[in-house]
Image: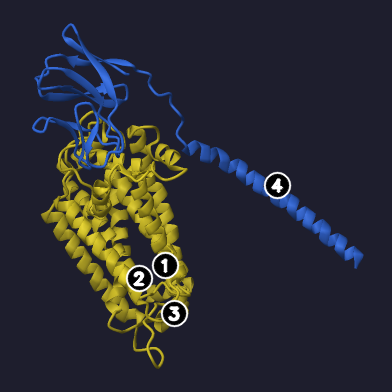
Amino acid sequence: MFRRALDWVGNRAGLEGAQDFLKHKTVPVHSGTIWYYLGGVTLFLFVIQVLTGMLLLLYYRPTPTEAFESVQFIVTQVEFGWLIRSVHSWAANLMVLTALLHMFSVFFLKAYRKPRELTWLSGMALLLLTFAFGFSGYLLPWNTLAYFATKVGTDMAGAVPVVGRFLRHFLRGGEEVTGATLTRFFGFHVAVLPGLTTLLLLLHLALVQKWGISSPKRPGGSGPAMPFYPNFVLRELIGWYGALGVLGMLAALFPWELGTKADPFASAPAGIRPEWYFLAVFFTLKLIPGKVLIFNGEALGILVFGLAAVGWMLVPFWDNRSEDEKRHLALTGGGVFVIAYLAVFSALGYWR
Amino acid sequence: MAEQETTDGRRRLIRALLGSGFAASIASFLYPAVRFMVPPQVAESTVNQVSAGKADLKPNSARIFRFGAKPALLVRTATGEFRAFSAVCSHLNCTVQYDDEKRQIWCACHNGQFDLNGKVTGGPPPSPLEQYTAHVQGDEVVVIRG
């Protein structure tokens, strides 16, 4: 009966093409195959975010007088509210982590090289959108940490040359971080960013499909491969199930703190620090003195970070060994240096 | 041949006219949407004088008060003198606090330090805190800009 229903749908929807396609798609097998699963896990966590985000929307209210109270209501009154909110916060952090790991794996395997430059660029844009999700979502509970993080973050945007003042005004919805900022960030978080992300995600996946999965060049042609379906898909599903397990454990054992309600007329509390993925930047900004030669230290720091990020994003265009697919030790060394810097400065930012 | 060229020229003209007309219509639709996204400039509050509360602050302590739309810090020095500053750190906009142990003003966000004249004594802030004039009127502290 089920079989017949399935055949009927397949027949009407013309699924034979899809079946045929799945039969022929393969995934390369080599020592780095494990890294192929990270993009999929990031996608899975994004789906979790969409689903739990929709649930939170049932109770959340985006105004400065009600935001904190509505999240408090979710975590104390609504059944399993604490769990849904905790999953949303933890999955956000795990998603940043897996997206970063995905990016570094693509960087070190040099999978961004021709013809996959656009895949890399769309991936970088998705990573920036992930940060934008994190930054805008962080403000929504309207707690003390979020309030000051947003003040600092939007003030940093103000240090961008030429458009800085406009950008800060645009992000804040005025001169200060107020209810206008909260309304804006809410709109970005639940409408603008999901829309943009969906479009870019489709482009990213279409490009991955178009050029096939990159594999390290071997002497004597291509190496072994496994069928995409069912071999790779089932392995990927194991990864997703594992991610779900880790997520459920973290969310249940370490429920995400809500903190205290933001008070625009209170001092920033001692020991304040941003989320882990902004720690390295945070600690560096702490170290840069007010004036470096004749330059404003803060503006200089932000400029250097910005230029470094742009340089990183454009790597497919200045990797001069891209064409002949040779090793590039300097580039790999640069990547190791970036990871070491991020690790050390994040640790220092956390403990000092 | 000549006829062909004339037709091509006409086609180009028509295409340019239609194309620029279409582009202009799209721009006229987008312009209001873009302007809508930019928050309107609200006149900065021109508060120049506020009450910072009762003058019952203990020596070597401080409190935050509202100066227009921004937080400000009223410090009573160990010698009993009142001093008032903008509480917005000149580095990245956090709100500063008074450190009674070190008798200085401190920002918890990036460890900026200021003395009791608002001058930077350590950390990343590029410029001093704006200082206000504070004086006691009756049992109240009145703070004036400038």
Q: Nearer the viewer, mark 1 or mark 2?
A: 1
Q: Is disc 1 in contact with disc 2, using a CB cutoff of under 8 Å?
A: yes
Q: Earlier in the sequence, mark 2 or mark 3?
A: 3
Query: What is the total number of numbered labels drawn onto the structure image?
Result: 4
- Which secondary structure lies at badge 1? helix
| Dot in front, 1 or 3 | 1
Q: How much space separates mark 1 and mark 2, taking CA atoms?
A: 9 Å
Residue farthest to the front?
Answer: A293
Residue holding disc 1:
A315
Task: From the image, tell me which residue sits under label 2.
Answer: A107
Q: Secondary structure at mark 3?
A: helix
Instruction: Name which quarter of the figure residue A70 lies in.
Output: top left
* Image location of residue A117, percent across then percent down: 46, 69
Q: Amino acid at mark 1?
A: Val
Q: Are marks 4 and 3 on the same chain?
A: no
Q: Characterize the local packing of mark 1: few (<14), some (14-19) or many (20 or more) Cα atoms within 10 angstroms.
A: some
The residues bearing labels 2 and 4 have C-alpha atoms spaced at a distance of 45 Å
Spatial separation of the CA atoms under disc 1 and disc 4: 40 Å
Q: Earlier in the sequence, mark 1 or mark 3?
A: 3
Three-letter amino acid code at the position of disc 4:
Gly
According to the image, label 3 marks what residue? Answer: A21
